[in-house]
Image: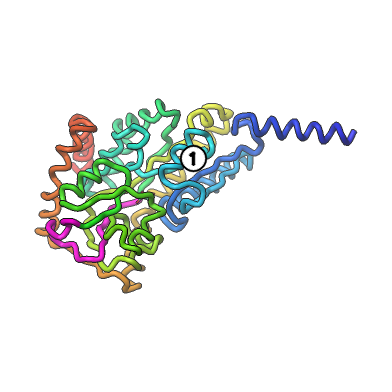
Amino acid sequence: MRTFAIAASIAALALGLAGPASAQSPIIIKFSHVVATETPKGKAAEKFKELAEKYTAGKVKVEVYPNSTLYKDKEELEALQLGSVQMLAPSNSKFGPLGIREFEVFDLPYILPDLKTLRKVTDGPLGTRLLKLLDAKGITGLAYWDNGFKQMSANKKLVTPADYQGVKFRIQSSRVLQAQFKALSSLPQVMAFSEVYQALQTGVVDGQENTWSNIYTQKMHEVQKYITETNHGYIGYVVIVNKKFWDDLPADIRDQLTKAMKEATEFGNAQSQKENDDALAEIKKSGKSEIIKLTAEQSEAMRKAMEPVYKDAAGRIGQPLIDEFLKEAKSTTN
Ligand code: LMR
């Protein structure tokens, strides 16, 4: 009797391991990301976990792995496609290595005046169409999550476009971001987010661009003398899930998870601005970095210096996509 029970449980275990993740009980969703928990993405992921487990009455367990503890940028996308993790939220700038460059439209300098404008684009037809592009890669796009606007940091004062000449900047894996720094005669270098702090500390790179919340939670301000408040670009995320895992879920579970995702998205996007404002206040309070504000003329000079990026991007992602984005963005401000 006892032998039978052991044999049965071994068989069940083997089945569980061999079968699809969606057939396990509870269903485990491994959600890997690269930022700290105390960030817009980190908090939205925790909210999703809370709601997903509540709405499915424990049938789903969400394991959130923050701060690149499970995978770094490039690895996490590969792990998702292989089914080693089920859910991620990479920034729009990180889909290029998958062969999808269209999300880089969000990287164009000064394309978004504010988060309200962004929302119309992500919630509109273009946002939906971009998510559909992921299907061909075995990925389902579920939502857009905000972080916020990027600032420039370095160990030298960055005020005019000429100040950027020859400065080594860490960038995310986006061709638009590469073109942006080339337009400024800087030297861009693609690097995983988890390596930025050390690269700044040891001088492998001189500077980087990021949101206040990422700068603060990674302590970049402790190894950068200056941060220039440029708000020149945007960082936001696409929440993605392994398509086969998602499609194989029982329909009622998928519905509950969709509801949890919708509410976690509303929660996260409603507080992203505050997260960044609070991080800025903390950085100021620390006194570790000098924060440089630009005049309207200086901002305009930066915008002009980065203008060639649009032409460069059109060659890769297409002018129609850029035009459509600008049209949807404009329609919101009227
Ligand atoms: C970065 O790599 O700088 C950011 O995309 C990190 C993140 O996920 O916010």
User: Quarter of the image containing the C terminus?
Assistant: top left
The magenta stretch spans which residues? Answer: 147-166
The local secondary structure at tag 1 comes to strand
Query: Looking at numbered disc 1 in the image, what kind of residue is underneath it?
Result: Met
Given residues 266 and 91, the one toward you in this image is 91
- Residue 56 position in % (x across, y down): 60, 39
Q: Which residue is located at x 50 percent, y 52 percent?
A: 69
Q: Is residue 196 above or below residue 221?
A: above
Which x, y percent locates residue 146? 36, 47
In this figure, what is the number of numbered marks?
A: 1
- Residue at image coords 35%, 42%: 94
Does residue 160 appear left or right of residue 241 in this picture? left
Residue carrying label 1: 87
Answer above or below: position of 58 versus 207.
above
Give residue 215's quadrant in the image.
bottom left
From the viewer's perspective, is 147 left or right of 246? left
**Which residue is pictured at 73% across the width and 32% down the height?**
12
Mark 1 Cα shell of 10 Å, populated few (<14), some (14-19), many (≥20) = many
Residue drawn at x 54%, y 38% as measured from the top left: 84
Assign the N terminus to one quadrant of the image: top right
Would you place residue 108 above or below residue 167 in this image? above
Q: Which corner quadrant of the image does residue 52 belong to?
A: top right
Residue 92 x, y percent position in the rendering: 33, 42
Q: Is-magenta flag for residue 163?
A: yes
Mark 1 Cβ and ligand 1 under 8 Å apart: no
293 in magenta? no
- Picture coordinates of residue 137 (x, y %)? 41, 29
Comparing 162 with 279, the one in front is 162
